């Protein structure tokens, strides 16, 4: 998969980006997607800056690769390889084994699914602090006695449907509050974090809800096509679908446009509020799917599932190169960010290092990633 980015356009007061969108928006009722696409897109790069598109004159191959995010992805690959080398040297033969790599992938599944959803909402200019609590709420709600009985009488996929619907509904509430209620995304999702965790504790009475009777669910996740866990394949499918949705669909182009400059996107004919709501619904649905993965792994639904998962997801997305301010996002980078995070954790565990050291290093990595983003953004503004 190639990287896909959208450069953040100039603000409404800056004539370049706004005029380009106004120009292409045409008469009222014109198709907004075509208008945005006309400003210049490639297979791996979307931009609203006419001067940096594939048709830009004088652009070198290296410059185009840089604009497409190729070097950013290569940088992440290099970082991952460096961690692998460190793990190989420090953990001896325990690190460089097939079982250990599968362990890293298994530990990446839940975080990866949540991070893919988080990539959309951050690319769209928002943030969702509630995904961890929504995971807990969805796992508890799906494993209530009533839902387990219905799933036993019908099919275990009913439990999956309930979990995903609970996550999507929580995302819908977030989206409506943010898009139509004009509540800051940080505050709205923080409130959902507290409320969802509290509701999960009330439903479960602060106890783990066993779901061991759903043998069909566990039989499905016990399968290993090509020797690889079913949960890992699910992460692969989610990542591929996320990449296609972000890079090959109208929905993805509108996400870049809304995150880059909401006012310009509105002038181009995009229903920004509706699209923002859909982004939060998508993120919530991913959290619901992550809840199913939690149930499959632990055989329980619990209000403690997903604790602080939102922070790891945001960190993985930012490390992967998605711009916190919105307008630029990459699923490939997000998956690499997740793998970097989990590989780093694996190296610490194999070397018997305390969790506090892991948290300290993770914090340093996040700060370094944000500083790097700011440095790159400032250089682009000056060029």
Image (spheres, rainbow, N blue to C red):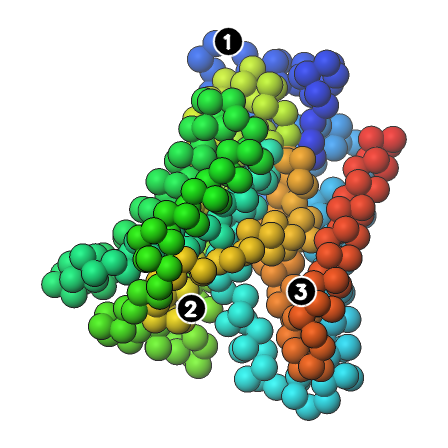
Residue sitting at x 67%, y 64%: 340
Counting labels gives 3
Residue sitting at x 67%, y 35%: 325
Residue sitting at x 68%, y 41%: 323
Is label 1 in contact with label 3 (beta carbons under 8 Å)? Answer: no
* Secondary structure under the numbered disc 2 in the rendered image: helix
Mark found first going from the N terminus, 2 or 1 = 1
At label 2, counting other C-alpha atoms closer than 10 Å, the crowd grade (few under 14, some 14-19, many 20 or more) is many
Q: Is residue 5 visible?
A: no
Give the number of the disc on residue 283: none
User: Whole-Å distance between the Cαs marked 3 and 2?
Assistant: 19 Å
Residue annotated with mark 1:
27
Q: Is residue 240 left or right of residue 150?
A: right
- The quarter in which the C terminus is drawn is top right
Q: Is residue 347 left or right of residue 177?
A: right
Residue annotated with mark 3:
340
Residue annotated with mark 2:
231
Mark found first going from the N terminus, 3 or 2 = 2
- Residue 85 point in image, percent of width and height: 76, 77
User: Whole-Å distance between the Cαs marked 1 and 3?
Assistant: 47 Å
């Amino acid at each position: 998969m190639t990287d896909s980015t959208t450069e953040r356009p100039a603000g409404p007061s800056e004539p370049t980006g706004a005029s380009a969108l106004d120009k292409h928006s045409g008469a009222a009722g014109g198709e907004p997607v075509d208008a945005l696409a006309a400003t210049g897109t490639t297979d791996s790069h979307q931009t609203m800056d006419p001067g940096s598109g594939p048709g830009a004159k004088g652009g070198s191959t290296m410059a185009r690769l840089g604009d497409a995010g190729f070097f950013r992805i290569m940088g992440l690959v290099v970082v991952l390889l460096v961690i692998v080398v460190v793990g190989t040297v420090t953990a001896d033969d325990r690190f460089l084994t097939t079982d250990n790599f599968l362990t890293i992938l298994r530990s990446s599944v839940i975080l990866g699914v949540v991070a893919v959803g988080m990539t959309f909402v951050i690319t769209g200019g928002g943030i969702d602090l509630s995904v961890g609590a929504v995971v807990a709420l969805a796992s508890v709600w799906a494993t209530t006695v009533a839902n387990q009985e219905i799933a036993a009488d019908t099919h275990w996929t009913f439990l999956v449907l309930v979990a995903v619907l609970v996550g999507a509904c929580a995302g819908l509430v977030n989206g409506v509050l943010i898009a139509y209620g004009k509540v800051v995304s940080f505050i709205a999702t923080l409130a959902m974090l507290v409320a969802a965790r509290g509701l999960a504790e009330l439903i479960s009475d602060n106890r783990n809800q066993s779901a061991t009777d759903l043998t069909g669910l566990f039989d499905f996740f016990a399968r290993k096509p090509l020797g690889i866990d079913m949960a890992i394949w699910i992460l692969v499918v989610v990542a591929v679908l996320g990449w296609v949705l972000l890079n090959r669909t109208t929905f993805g182009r509108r996400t870049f446009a809304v995150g880059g400059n909401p006012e310009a996107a509105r002038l181009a004919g995009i229903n920004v509020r509706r699209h923002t709501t859909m982004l939060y619904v998508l993120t919530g649905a991913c959290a619901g799917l992550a809840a199913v993965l939690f149930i499959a792994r632990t055989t329980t639904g619990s209000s403690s599932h997903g604790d602080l998962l939102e922070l790891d997801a945001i960190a993985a997305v930012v490390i992967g190169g998605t711009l916190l301010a919105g307008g630029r996002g990459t699923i490939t980078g997000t998956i690499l960010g997740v793998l970097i995070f989990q590989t780093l954790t694996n190296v610490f565990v194999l070397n018997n290092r305390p969790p506090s050291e892991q948290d300290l290093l993770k914090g340093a990595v996040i700060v370094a990633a944000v500083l790097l983003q700011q440095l790159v953004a400032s250089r682009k503004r000056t060029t």
